[in-house]
Image: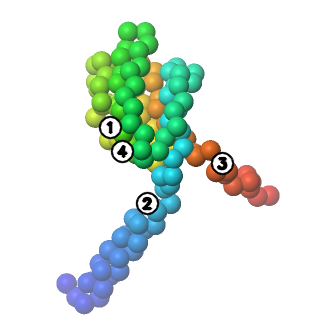
Amino acid sequence: MKKNDFILIATLLICSIIAFFAVNSTQTRQGGKVVIKIDGQIYRTLDFSATTHEEIIIENNGHRNVLLIDNGRVDMIEANCPDKTCVRQKPIQYENQTIVCLPSKLVIEIEAQIGIEESEIDIIQ
């Protein structure tokens, strides 16, 4: 390899590291609420913060899911669905992240903190 190849590789590596930290710093973790939906309908809404600790059992139509909210994270720790994809998914902790269990038609999402408004610009003409 030539000197210019090493410079190119080093530059790409530095740009990748900067991009990684830039993306991670835009995700907020200031609280908000955890919304649990079953078949598109809101089942339960919970306030969410780093100090919240709660275990929630969700039962519907023969399906059973156990959700753990602890240490600023939301994790599906148990499910009786056949594939258990929702249990293998890593815990969520940032706004707009979701956990989905398709057999039980269950969606858990962390929504934006109350009081934080989105940008008012919807479209530029």
- Residue 115's tag is 3
Residue ID for mark 4: 71
Q: Say if 6 sits above or below 75 in the image.
A: below
Residue ID for mark 1: 89
Mark 4 near mark 1, Cβ–Cβ under 8 Å? no
Please identify the quadrant where the C terminus is shown. bottom right
Name the foreground residue: 30 vs 23: 30
Mark 3 near mark 1, Cβ–Cβ under 8 Å? no
- Mark 3 and mark 2 lie on one chain; the one further toward the N terminus is 2
Q: Image quadrant of residue 61?
A: top left
Secondary element at tag 4: loop
Query: Does the rendering let one see residue 114?
Result: yes
Disc 1/disc 2 C-alpha distance (Å): 19 Å
Residue 118 pos. (x, y %): 66, 51
Disc 4/disc 1 C-alpha distance (Å): 17 Å
Disc 3/disc 2 C-alpha distance (Å): 22 Å
Residue 117 pos. (x, y %): 67, 51
At horizontal 52% and vertical 37% (from top left) the residue drawn is 47
Residue ID for mark 2: 24
